[in-house]
Amino acid sequence: KKNTIRTRFGKIEVHKSHNFSEPVLGQRTSPFLQEKLTILGTEEVFGQVPARVASLLGIEVSESQVYRTCQRVSAQLEAEALCSPSEALEVLESEAHQEVYGMVDGSMLFTDEGWQETKLGRVFTADLIEHKTHRWQVNESQYVAKRGHYESFTAQFEQLLPPQSECKKIFVTDGALWISNWIKATYHSCVHILDFFHVLEKVAEAKPKDTQWLELQKKDLLASRTTKVINRIKLLPNSKCFDNLIGYLEKNQDKMNYKYYREKGWMIGSGPIESAHRTVLQVRMKRSGIRWANHGCDNMIKLRVAYMNNNGNAIRDVLKSVA
């Protein structure tokens, strides 16, 4: 009695008593093929994967096989593997002179219970490659993500960027209260910068059609003259409509010293986390017509993070450990 086993070299027949004939994660499919099905299922909707597998590998698989493989691999992914820094990032975090950025934001995903927020974090280093245009190159980037309450997310983020690490920690955020409170309580010696473009967008609401007025506010913000911007808004005829904006600016003035930040060569915008929404989550999970069950949503979030971190080594390691 023999089983047909698919390998990278094609199909082979193996006696049922042979070790290679043992099920891997409940399937009599080679770890090599399961890895490819998981990666493809993490990139594309499950229904599109069989055609790609047939085209690339000449192997017939079903949509349900792709789905089951992804669920089983996700279930085996340990939290430690998903939020541990790579060796390279860990070395950088241990160096006192090294500047390491942390960015956090929420991404909305559509589920059976409606729109739910997934907290997404990114830890990375960056080089300023064009001073005139302030273009940056992001390096050693890693992610953590978690649906639900922020406390479970922050625990994972703190493993990726330990508060006690020696590096210079720089956070650029949108000023959300829970983020500010968490950073203040956890990362005592960090630099916390309020995203400049988020601030400018809010200030524009005061006089949305007056580009000349907005340009003046932009110059003053970049020159760290925040008080002047606040006073101009207070002098507007309808200033009472902008009490929330004035309160937001006054409360966050200590995070808006943009002139100093730029002189130090630091980022003042949260572009890297904004782009991460698309590349980590939305490109797979926010397509037209897609709705997720909570467990399916959580499983795919884990797979997307594992796929984006360390070249997908966490997925590969799961299959190696059970093969």
Image (cartoon, rainbow, N blue to C red):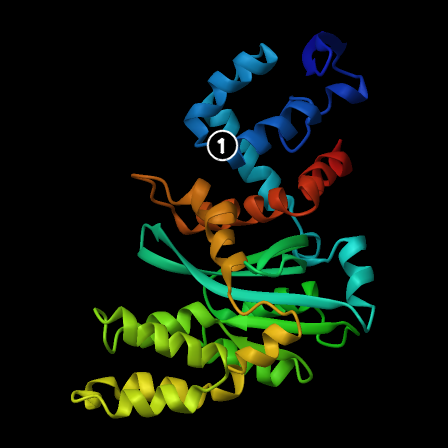
Classify 10 Å Cα crowding around label 1: few (below 14), some (14-19), many (20 and above): some
User: In the shown orientation, is residue 128 left or right of residue 117?
Assistant: right
Q: What element carries label 1?
A: helix
Q: Which of 109 and 202 is in front in this view?
A: 202
- Number of marks present in the image shown: 1
For the question of whether residue 129 can be seen, the reply is yes
Which quarter of the rendering shows the N terminus? Answer: top right
User: In the shown orientation, is residue 92 left or right of residue 174?
Assistant: right
| Up-down relation of residue 187 to residue 201 (above or below) | below
Q: Which of 5 and 97 is in front in this view?
A: 97
User: In the shown orientation, is residue 71 left or right of residue 200?
Assistant: right
| Up-down relation of residue 298 to residue 193 (above or below) | above
Q: Which residue is drawn at the image coordinates 52% and 28% (left, top)?
A: 66
Identify the image quadrant of residue 257.
bottom right
x and y percentages locating residue 259 in the rendered image: 56, 79
For the question of whether residue 146 can be seen, the reply is no
User: In the shown orientation, is residue 173 left or right of residue 22?
Assistant: left
x and y percentages locating residue 154 in the rendered image: 58, 70
Identify the image quadrant of residue 296.
top left
Residue receiving disc 1: 67
Instruction: Name, please, the residue furthest toward the left.
Output: 237
Q: Which residue is drawn at the image coordinates 47% and 32% (left, top)?
A: 44
x and y percentages locating residue 234 in the rendered image: 27, 92
| Up-down relation of residue 313 to residue 54 (above or below) | below
Which quarter of the rendering shows the C terminus? Answer: top right
Q: Which amino acid does label 1 sit on?
A: Tyr
Q: Which residue is drawn at the image coordinates 47% and 17% (left, top)?
A: 51
Identify the image quadrant of residue 226.
bottom left
| Up-down relation of residue 57 to residue 280 (above or below) | above
x and y percentages locating residue 9 in the rendered image: 73, 11
Q: Which of 129 and 49 is in front in this view?
A: 129
Q: Nearer the viewer, residue 104 or 130?
A: 130
